[in-house]
Image (cartoon, grey):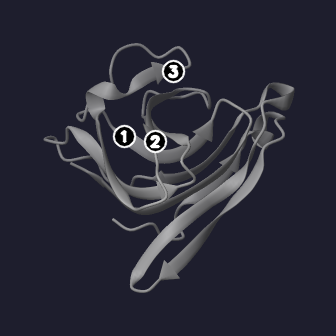
């Protein structure tokens, strides 16, 4: 699926942090994509910006991973998955990936997603996934990432 305006932007300001940024929906030739930019700041116990999509339907039971088409400013980014069991805002399953300045495909097996925020056990496709997010996280830096496609495989 291609990113559309149903992606929402969040920063750590919801919990008192000082990160700033935004998401824009752009076109280049025949390609449409979402661009997230911002300054990630760890000041005041902060440290993230993210664009998140709520998932309206359960994943196919055979899903074993996530496929992204991305480019960016040669930094490390993260995908955060939330399920029906991630009740607190700081709970998610996380997998990191690196981007280059050219469009490239990233495949993230579900087995690579680590639980965070007190969760136990791996994320599985049979769990009810409620959202997927692309995040710049954990250190002071400027973020710019373009997301052209995201799909569960």
Instruction: Spot the residue most to the bottom.
Output: 29
Contact? badges 1 and 2 (CB < 8 Å)? no
Q: Nearer the viewer, residue 68 or 122?
A: 68
Residue 129 tag number: 1
Q: Position of residue 94 (x, y in %)?
A: 46, 30
The numbered mark, 1 or 2, whose residue comes first in the sequence reads: 2
Which element type, helix, strand or loop, lies under badge 1?
A: strand
The numbered mark, 3 or 2, whose residue comes first in the sequence reads: 2
Front position among marks 1 and 2: 2
Crowd around label 1: few <14 · some 14–19 · many ≥20 (10 Å): many
Q: CA distance from mark 1 to mark 3?
A: 15 Å
Q: Position of residue 69 (x, y in %)?
A: 36, 58
Q: Nearer the viewer, residue 143 or 124?
A: 143
Q: CA distance from mark 1 to mark 2?
A: 23 Å
Residue picked out by circle 2: 98
Instruction: Spot the residue most to the left.
Output: 62
Residue 116 tag number: 3
Which element type, helix, strand or loop, lies under badge 2?
A: strand
Q: Nearer the viewer, residue 74 or 121?
A: 74
Which element type, helix, strand or loop, lies under badge 3?
A: strand
Query: Image check: 61 left or right of 82?
Result: left
Q: CA distance from mark 3 to mark 2?
A: 20 Å
Q: Which residue is located at x 62 percent, y 35 percent? A: 137
Q: Which residue is located at x 46 percent, y 52 percent? A: 100
Crowd around label 2: few <14 · some 14–19 · many ≥20 (10 Å): some
Depicted 138 relative to depicted 53: above or below: above
Asked where in the image residue 148 lies, by quadrant, the reply is: bottom left
């Amino acid at each position: 699926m291609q990113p559309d305006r149903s992606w929402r932007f969040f920063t750590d300001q919801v919990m008192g942090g000082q990160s700033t940024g935004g998401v824009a929906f752009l076109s280049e030739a025949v390609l449409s994509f979402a661009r997230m930019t911002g300054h990630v700041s760890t000041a005041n116990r902060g440290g993230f910006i993210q664009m998140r999509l709520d998932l309206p339907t359960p994943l196919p039971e055979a899903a074993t991973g996530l496929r992204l088409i991305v480019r960016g400013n040669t930094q490390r980014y993260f995908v955060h998955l939330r399920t029906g069991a991630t009740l607190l805002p700081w709970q998610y399953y996380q997998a990191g990936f690196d981007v280059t300045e050219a469009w490239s495909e990233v495949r993230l097996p579900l087995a690579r997603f680590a639980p965070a925020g007190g969760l136990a056990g791996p994320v599985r496709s049979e769990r009810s996934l409620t959202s997927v997010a692309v995040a710049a996280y954990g250190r002071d830096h400027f973020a710019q990432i373009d997301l052209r496609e995201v799909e569960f495989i």
